[in-house]
Image: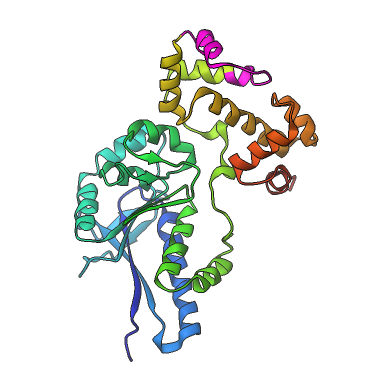
């Protein structure tokens, strides 16, 4: 039997506490692509391979779901791409503590990168990748609910938290949970063609049109570093979003200088206080679209806007969806 040429060897870094879905989803996606390639190209079809890599030489790991993955064997050669999957955590602080203690994994990531292996982090695996220093000075994304913690922990990274996948040379990051599938589909398209990637996406029911994490963001679920000043700012903006606010007025209300306010908001939110106010208004509109039958004009009024057309443009820019599309996709329905 003639051995098929290999299109892609994906190595997945595994460790105790790794999320099972971060391993299974990319593995299954490449398996589907492999089968589709055989149907399309026959014996000459390029092969897709997945291999598990353990930095500490163990042949087994305990996943976050309590399942044991065994049979991990030492690599004979480097993979084409090293994927750092998500790790389960209870809080951002716990995640940072966990990843900071993974010195052997960080060393492996750095050494493979130096040898020319492309590296990628998905979901909370982006924190481990950032710990390696390979994201410093690069654009990157992460799980949207951990954006504030990521921004504070890794200020040298140019965080683009709304993006599903961010590619920067030989380093790639993917957002929360299922964004790893978007990453894998891009790899399939890169080494073969867009048609095979699209066929794989259809079989896996992955929407090829989704380009952003923004529609899925819920302010209530975002984990924020604890800060009295942050809490004061958020409380004021949430309570007073129905009216116009100035930087000066916000600074006075929270008891700080305008300069400190601007610097603090940039560090905590990645944007100024007025831009953050706009984002909170969009969050309020999203909640009302999900849970009420109010017209969009009524929602706009409740969010402190008088110009429906302007707010519609703002909503589309922030969520990548029209208000009608958002309501259709995310309205809470009884089952």
* Region of the chain picked out in magenta, as a range: 237-255
Left of 277 or right of it: where is 79?
A: left
Residue 108 rendering spot, x and y as whole percentages:
21, 53
Asked whether residue 224 appears in the rendered view, the answer is: no
* Apparent side of residue 13 relative to residue 35 in the rendered image (left or right): left
Q: Quadrant of residue 136?
A: top left
Split into 4 quadrants, where in the image is the N terminus?
Answer: bottom left
Residue at 47% x, 20% y is 230
Nearer to me, 203 or 256: 256
In the rendered view, tell whether residue 295 sits above or below residue 4: above
Q: Is residue 123 above or below residue 299?
A: below
Closest to the observer, 62 or 144: 144
Give the residue displayed 56% in from the left and 61% down from the top: 206
Q: Position of residue 170 (x, y in %)?
A: 31, 57
Residue 256 position in % (x across, y down): 45, 10
Which residue corresponds to the image point at 43% horizontal and 32% vertical from the top-left?
148
Which quadrant would residue 96 be assigned to in this image? top left
Q: Give yes or no for residue 245 being in the magenta stretch.
A: yes
Residue 248 visible here: yes
* Residue 299 part of the magenta-drawn span: no
Horizontal arrangement in the rendering, residue 177 relative to residue 281 (left or right): left
Is 268 placed above or below 46 here? above
Asked whether, in this view, residue 193 is left or right of residue 168, the answer is right
């Amino acid at each position: 039997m003639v051995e098929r040429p290999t299109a892609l060897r994906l190595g997945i870094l595994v460790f105790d506490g790794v999320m099972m879905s971060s391993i299974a989803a990319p593995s299954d996606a490449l398996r589907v692509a492999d089968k589709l390639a055989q149907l399309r190209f026959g014996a000459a079809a390029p092969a897709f391979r997945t291999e598990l890599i353990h930095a500490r030489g163990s042949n087994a790991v305990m996943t976050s779901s309590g399942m044991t993955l065994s049979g991990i064997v030492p690599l004979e050669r480097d993979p084409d791409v090293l994927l750092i999957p998500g790790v389960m955590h209870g809080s951002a602080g716990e995640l940072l503590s966990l990843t900071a203690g993974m010195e052997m994994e960080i060393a492996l990531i750095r050494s493979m990168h130096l040898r020319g292996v492309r590296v990628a982090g998905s979901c909370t695996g982006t924190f481990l990748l950032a710990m390696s220093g390979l994201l410093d000075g690069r654009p990157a994304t992460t799980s949207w609910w951990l954006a504030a913690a990521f921004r504070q922990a890794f200020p040298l990274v140019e965080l683009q938290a709304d993006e599903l996948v961010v590619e920067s040379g030989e380093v790639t990051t993917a957002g929360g949970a299922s964004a790893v599938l978007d990453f894998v589909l891009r790899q399939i398209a890169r080494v073969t063609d867009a048609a095979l990637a699209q066929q794989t996406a259809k079989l896996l029911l992955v929407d090829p049109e989704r380009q952003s994490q923004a529609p899925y963001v819920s302010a209530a679920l975002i984990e924020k570093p604890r800060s009295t000043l942050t809490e004061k700012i958020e409380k004021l903006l949430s309570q007073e979003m129905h009216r116009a606010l100035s930087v000066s007025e916000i600074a006075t209300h929270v008891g700080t200088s305008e300069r400190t306010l601007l610097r603090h908001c940039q560090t905590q939110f990645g944007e100024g206080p007025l831009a953050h106010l706009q984002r909170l208004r969009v969050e309020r509109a999203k909640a009302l679209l999900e849970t009420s039958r109010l017209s969009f004009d009524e929602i706009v009024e409740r969010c402190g806007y008088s110009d429906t057309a302007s707010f519609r443009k703002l909503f589309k820019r922030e969520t990548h969806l029209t208000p009608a599309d958002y309501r259709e996709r995310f309205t809470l329905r009884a089952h």
